[in-house]
Amino acid sequence: MKDDVETEIAVTGSARTGGAKVWLSEEVSQRVAPLLSGIGIELLALPDRECATVRVQSITVAGRVGSVTQRLRIERHEGAAEAEIEFDAPNVWAAASCIASQAFGLSPPLLTADAAMFAVIRAATRAAQVNSPVLVTGETGTGKELLVRLIHAASGRAGGMFSINCAALDEATGADAPDAAGRGSAGGEHRLEELCAAFDITLFLDQISELSPVAQTRVLYAILRAAEGTAGAKRPGARLVLATNRPLGPLVLSGEFKRDLYGRLAVLTIGMPPLRDRRADIALLAVNFLRIAAPQLSFTSGALKALSNYPFPGNVRELHNLVTRLAIMPRDGVSRLIDAADVRAQFVVPVLSASIWKSSPFQQRREMVMQALMVCGGDRPAAARKLGISVRALQQHVVVGPPSRNR
């Protein structure tokens, strides 16, 4: 067996003063350094590594003939607090996102093995360097809040991050909803206007599309008052970051969302891709979730393939919930392996009606068909019965794209 190769990477410094700072060996820097510099992480000279707060070990182990396993292990030490990330088979994107997550203190980490998703991370770190509002869009369960935390961490704001659920915003008083995630108190003693005018904080408005007309007026008023109060101030005011799973443009056109409020909020927009468009992340995230939930268990290659072929309409949240169920399900014997049959048993087939099927876009119908096929192990008649459609209708959707209109 080949000896392990260990590479130490030191990270220190404040994102507020020019980004996290990293020391890299020549071997690792050739692959990862360009990505890190692209998200504002500065490379240090060798003598500066003593002041590290993050240590990264990239370990390559040659196993049986024809097989190679790579493992990336990262430890963060900051006072008494310690955090650790470890996962197998990282590619260059996974390594860079893992290092960035620890450099900015993200827990859980924002991991990706997908180039397009890493471009989202890069966009978020760049947006963090300006004071303009950032609108994060994406389907439910894609991880928008974690990206918001990255924006806050990369901005280096000392005043903390406060979250408001816009769907629960009090229309009459404008009082803030409690911050269930514990990132600072955003209870009823604070008012929306006070937070908008606060210095050096990140104010996260979640589900911004769910604001009622009255609450929209309240938010716009608070933003305008805050802009007047912080004009000419030496310290930065509140940084607004917003998230929505519904595109705001159509809501503006229909009159459901105020155009002037939209103009104030939609300065910088970052879209989170759905999990089905970042297939390389499915196995990476699943293994990471399982290591946290049940480190004594592991996936077979067939199980990871079954996961990677599933469309995950619920995105990362659905994947996390599925892995949690796999971790606690009753097991026969002493097997510590999760196989493809175990995975398929946890897939959920949507309950459809004829009206839902007919009104759904082709791509959405195709995803439902693929879900059913995964659950039924490829048995098309059984999948059709679960969906309540004919086998012919099912087969029409097991194609690359929608049927041509010219036919």
Image: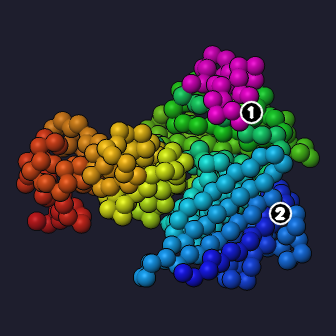
Compare residues 77 and 153 and report the one nearer the observer: 77
Measure the C-alpha gap from mark 2 to mark 1.
27 Å
Residue range (magenta): 168-191
- On the picture, is 387 further left or further right than 188? left
**Residue plotted at (78% across, 28% down):** 194
Element type at mark 2: loop
Compare residues 175 and 151 and report the one nearer the observer: 151
Q: Position of residue 1 (x, y in %)?
A: 54, 81
**Is residue 406 positioned above or below 220 on the image?**
below
Q: Position of residue 37 (x, y in %)?
A: 72, 72
Q: Quadrant of residue 264?
A: top right
- Type of amino acid under label 1: Gly
**Residue plotted at (40% across, 57% down):** 299
Q: Is residue 178 magenta?
A: yes
Q: Position of residue 225 (x, y in %)?
A: 77, 32
Residue under numbered circle 2: 52
Q: Predominant secondary structure in magenta?
A: loop
Q: Is residue 386 magenta?
A: no
Tell me the tag on residue 184. 1
- On the picture, is 120 further left or further right than 139? right
